[in-house]
Amino acid sequence: MGTNIDATITIFTEFYYWVTIVFMFLIHIGFCLYEVGASRRRNHLSTLMKNTMAIPLVTITFFFFGWWIYFAFPNGGPDPALARHAAPWSPLMSTHLSGPSEGVEAATAAYWHRLNGVFWGAFLLFSITTASIVSGAIIERVRMGAFWIIAVLLGSVLWILDAAWGWHPLGWMVRELGYHDAYASGVVHAIAGGAALATLIVLGPRIGKFRPDGTPRDIPPHNTWLVCVGLLCIFTGFWGFYAACNIPIISPATIAGQITGETWTATNIYLAPTTLSAITFNFLMSLSGGMLSAYVISRGNPFWTFSGGLCGVISASAGNDLYHPIQAMLIAAIVVAICYRLHYWVERRFKIDDAVGAVAVHGYGGFLGVVVAGFMLWGTPSSPYEGFAVITPWGNFIGAVIMFALGFIPVFIVAKILESVGLLRVPPRVELEGLDFSTNESFLAAVSEVSAAEKAMVK
């Protein structure tokens, strides 16, 4: 590892990302609690398994090609030379304690031997989160296999492609547009919201959601307190997500750019300076602004109060590395009010049955968050590299459109294909009886048999 200082920095960095991965896993615990609480009793197990099995599927596919996409596509088209260390057959994608690696430069090998696994793990958790956002919107009517296909497409291809373009230090959107999205308002949330909307349009509403005159019926969560506990877990994991978007202890001397100074405690994903204090101030202030706004506008509805907190953080995430805490709070409060109104307007106008408001919270909140950051940070350098465009409203607006469209268009096409072959939605009878019908019947039969045996023993 070189000097003792180099060793200390490496050990700290590796442990730093390892901890963020553990925290981020709480997001998926939260999603499971959240979605099971939002579904009706007859669909609990299928809802749980649908979301849970996305974890191994996205993990394996992200290992084989998702990580490679991030490094191969920052310039738009694939450049395999940039991604040699991320190919699944690379020696750097395995346990490697020391020594040279054939075909890999010594400096590259020394760095990635120690940190490739934890970086991969952090991005993997971003991937699973992106896929899971769609899961809640489409509960109680989608076939598991259809969702898993969409989850792999979104989690291991689409989101990581947009990350290569707009969330890589050398991404073309950063270089040409000045795109700034520090904590993934667009890169994760807008693209997932676009994918959720596309799936919902093709999938259609749950049976009984709309009256004959077209007005929507409320299908309340089966267990509201479980939904709220799930969202609290998501808040906690999201804080780890924020930390994972930063790079700790980096020297400007390693960046041939225009932002110079002493060694920084942290940089954002673009290698520009920020601090963990910024995360602490702005995460909590945007969470609070979102919750207060949602509490008022929903008249104290617990589901929307907690969802508003999540939407508030998402809406400020694009610029939370640089915002003043009061800015973060006000942006969250205003965007949450807009997203709440948009959710119900779209539901009534277009008959979109989003069971958990995922399109509003993640899609609209993420899109607007990127656009707002373009105005609030107008003229600020987007990157420490010389020649990169500065942050502008038009650059971030174009970027937000790209993010939403990259989720919407491919997923819409895949959903239409699945629908055409009868693999997207469960049959009406299954939906009415519940996706857990066969499991519940087996359980009741087993209980009845044991009960009969016990009664016979008593006689």
Image (cartoon, rainbow, N blue to C red):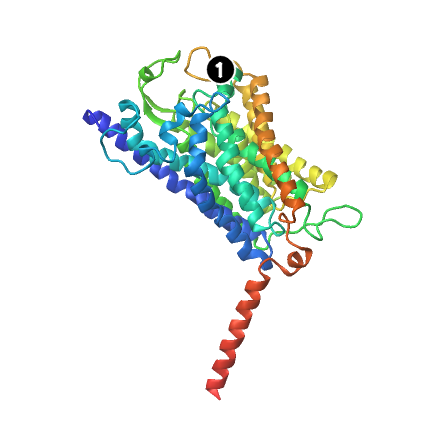
Badge 1: residue crowd in 10 Å (few <14, some 14–19, many ≥20): some
> Compared to 122, does 45 lie above or below?
below
Residue at (19%, 24%) from the top-left corner? 3
> Compared to 262, does 188 lie above or below?
below
- Residue 154: % across, % down: 53, 37
Q: Please, what is the three-letter code of the amino acid marked with disc 1? A: Thr
Q: Left or right of 8: which side holds 309?
A: right
Confirm whether residue 233 shows in the render: no
Confirm whether residue 217 shows in the render: yes
Q: Choose between 102 and 334: the one closer to the eye.
A: 102
- Residue 459: % across, % down: 49, 89
Location of the N terminus (image quadrant) = top left
> Compared to 328, does 423 lie above or below?
below
Q: Choose between 190 and 199: the one closer to the eye.
A: 199
Q: Which residue is mark 1?
A: 380
Residue at (43%, 42%) from the top-left corner? 60
Q: Name the image quarter holding residue 204.
A: top right
Q: Left or right of 210: which side holds 4?
A: left
Q: Choose between 227 and 122: the one closer to the eye.
A: 122
Q: Left or right of 280: which side holds 343?
A: right
Q: Total number of numbered labels? A: 1
Looking at this view, name the residue that lies furthest to the bottom. 459
- Residue 346: % across, % down: 70, 37
Residue at (66%, 51%) from the top-left corner? 219
Circle 1 — which element? loop
- Residue 242: % across, % down: 43, 33
Q: Name the image quarter holding residue 445.
A: bottom right
